Amino acid sequence: MSGGLDATLALRRSDAFRLDVRLSIPAGRTAALLGPNGAGKSTAVAALAGTLPLDGGRIQLGAVVLDDPAVGVLVPPEERRVGVVFQDYLLFPHLSVLENVAFGLRSRGVSRSQARDRARTWIRRLDLAGLEERRPRDLSGGQAQRVALARALATEPDLLLLDEPLGALDVTTRWEVRRTLAEHLGEFRGPRLLITHDPAEAFLLADEIHVLEDGRVTQTGTPDDIRLRPRTPYAADLGDTNLLRGAARGGDVDVGSHILHVADHDVAGPVLVTVRPTSVSVHLARPQGSPRNSWPTTVARVERLGHRVRLLTGAPLPIMVEVTEEARSELGLVPGAEIWVALKATEIGVEAAGGVSG
């Protein structure tokens, strides 16, 4: 089993675009490379997987140098202990599930019988038993994603790359597969790199997030660092939805420092809570009618984003709130101001999160 990943990726794809990224991921940790389309995410995957050689920089996985143009080192893709799960899975349509999972092992010289035995082990681990002889066309999106993950893990890689792993799934399937993915990421002992444009994926699955814009990392931090202290307009837009983890029971959600009352009384256990910043109202005194979700707090930070004004509230529940410039001026919303916030139960989204953890 490898140690961590230590990589400096320098590549020029054209006169207009250059990737210049520094990544350090300890073993047993999940990092996310989060950015919009065209930011350079696919280029980073290709460099780490070995299909695109570096122009400069260096890739080291544990004690093994995979790419260092300065000294002429370039390990080919088939010799790198790197498992990749792609968005479209790249399953071989003419092979069964069993043969798809065994393919990576066979390509590394493992005998057919041993490869099939190890493939069956991973098929069982990912709850695919009974599907061994099916072809990819006969699988659901969630099943195909798990087959791709099993194929990557069966080779016992030292680095796991997940390239938009949930991008091809419908909304109904996505949260179920995300839970499965989180559980198996926790069992993988090497470094894990999630490539995504979806902040919910990154916030839920990653320990650390690298925000990638125009080929460069503009911010690195925990999910809360990115959500609460964005450094660029793009990073601020990622916070258009407050994402909170909690535990639900009987219409109440414990988010660790506060209890939120929600409209859905049926969901129980670990949940993902979503709150739009525009759904939170701001008052100078306790709002009339005493809505169930209202509490006193302070203004921790004020940011102007074009025609919008975004506030970060303080304890007991730091969340982003969006108001107009007129409201900010009329209410005197400055750092340190004492306020009340209110939130309707029907404006709080609640989604079962299963074993997901950041």
Image (cartoon, rainbow, N blue to C red):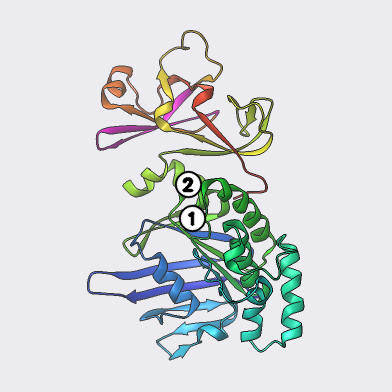
**Picture quadrant where residue 93 is located:** bottom right
Vertically, is 78 above or below 285? below
Dots 2, 1 in contact, CB < 8 A:
yes
| Disc 2, SS | helix
Query: Crowdedness of circle 1 by 10 Å Cα count: few (<14), some, many (20+)?
Result: many
> Hey, what amino acid is under mark 1?
Ile
Distance CA(mark 2)–CA(mark 1): 9 Å
Using the rendered image of the protein, determine whether residue 222 is visible from the camera's viewpoint.
no
Left or right, 269 with respect to 83, comes to: right
> Hey, what amino acid is under mark 2?
Asp
The image shows residue 349 at horizontal and vertical percentages of: 53, 33
168 drawn magenta: no
| Foreground of the two, 303 or 326 | 326
Q: On the image, numbered disc 1 is attached to which residue?
A: 209
**Picture quadrant where residue 141 is located:** bottom right
| Disc 1, SS | strand
The residue that appears at 44% across and 74% down in the rendered structure is: 46
The image shows residue 228 at horizontal and vertical percentages of: 45, 41
**Picture quadrant where residue 153 is located:** bottom right
The residue that appears at 27% across and 26% down in the rendered structure is: 325
Q: Which of marks 2 and 1 is in front?
A: 1
The image shows residue 117 at horizontal and vertical percentages of: 77, 77
The residue that appears at 37% across and 44% down in the rendered structure is: 237
Query: Crowdedness of circle 2 by 10 Å Cα count: few (<14), some, many (20+)?
Result: some
The residue that appears at 29% across and 17% down in the rendered structure is: 330
Q: Earlier in the sequence, mark 2 or mark 1?
A: 1
**Residue range of the region highlighted in magenta in the rendering:** 297-316
Q: On the image, numbered disc 2 is attached to which residue?
A: 225
Vertically, is 157 above or below 234? below
